[in-house]
Image (cartoon, rainbow, N blue to C red):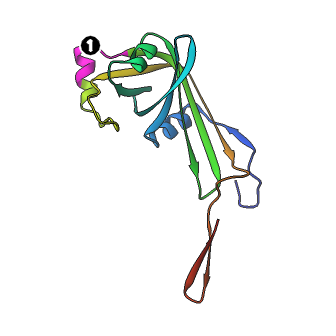
Amino acid sequence: MTETEPLAATEQLTVPQCWTLLRSTPLGRLATVVDGRPDIHPVNHLVDHGTVLFRTADGTKLRAAVGHEVAFEADGYDADVGRAWSVVVKGTAREISELDESLGVMILPLFPWQAGPKPRYVRIEPASVTGRRFVVSGGMRPATVFRVAGSSIVVT
């Protein structure tokens, strides 16, 4: 794409592009069903062998996820080019319980953001991975900096 060529309104991402973007951000949202109603849980995650991995404690999130179909979504924004992206992974969540697999994930740099023990590891095994990237037409845009006689004025 050249500077004079207009950006497409929406670009469908390939699966490898989706995984690359998921690796670039530590935070996403886990969508589950709790008591028959949709629920969203923010989680920090890692991409591990074509799956999404997160840690949690006993509780609602673990019960709603493990053994069920879930969706995981992460997104980002590139202020330099004014484009945003969104990736959705849909699949089945399962708790890691086998010794070999448990030892393998315990060495990964996946540390809880919230205080308290998070001893349970959950892996989302994808049935589908989709994503899109698009030009942001309003809202956040890169700041423009003007320099006037040694002073900077930032216009957003």
Name the spot of residue 123 as percent of width and height, x first: 40, 21
Q: Is residue 49 visible?
A: no
The answer to whether residue 97 is seen in the rendering is yes
Most foreground residue, 72 or 114: 114
Rendered location of residue 2, percent (x, y): 71, 58
Residue highlighted by disc 1: 98
| In the foreground, 53 or 60 | 60
The C terminus lies in quadrant:
bottom right
Q: Position of residue 150 (x, y in %)?
A: 55, 87
Residue 100 inside the magenta-drawn segment: yes
Q: Residue at x 72, y 52 (%)?
A: 138
Q: Residue at x 22, y 15 (%)?
A: 99
Looking at the image, the residue that sits furthest to the bottom is 149
Q: Is residue 154 left or right of residue 135?
A: left
Residues rendered magenta in the picture: 95-103
Q: Amino acid at mark 1?
A: Glu
Q: Tell me if mark 1 has few (under 14), some (14-19) or many (20+) residues whose alpha carbon lies within 10 angstroms of its own.
A: few
Instruction: Identify whether 62 is placed above or below 7.
Output: above
Examine the structure image and report whether residue 104 is included in the region drawn in magenta: no
* Element marked by disc 1: loop
Residue 104 percent location from the top left of the image: 26, 25
Q: Quadrant of residue 66?
A: top left
In this rendering, position of residue 74 left or right of residue 67: right
- Left or right of residue 26: residue 99: left
Q: In the figure, 81 relative to 65: above or below? A: below
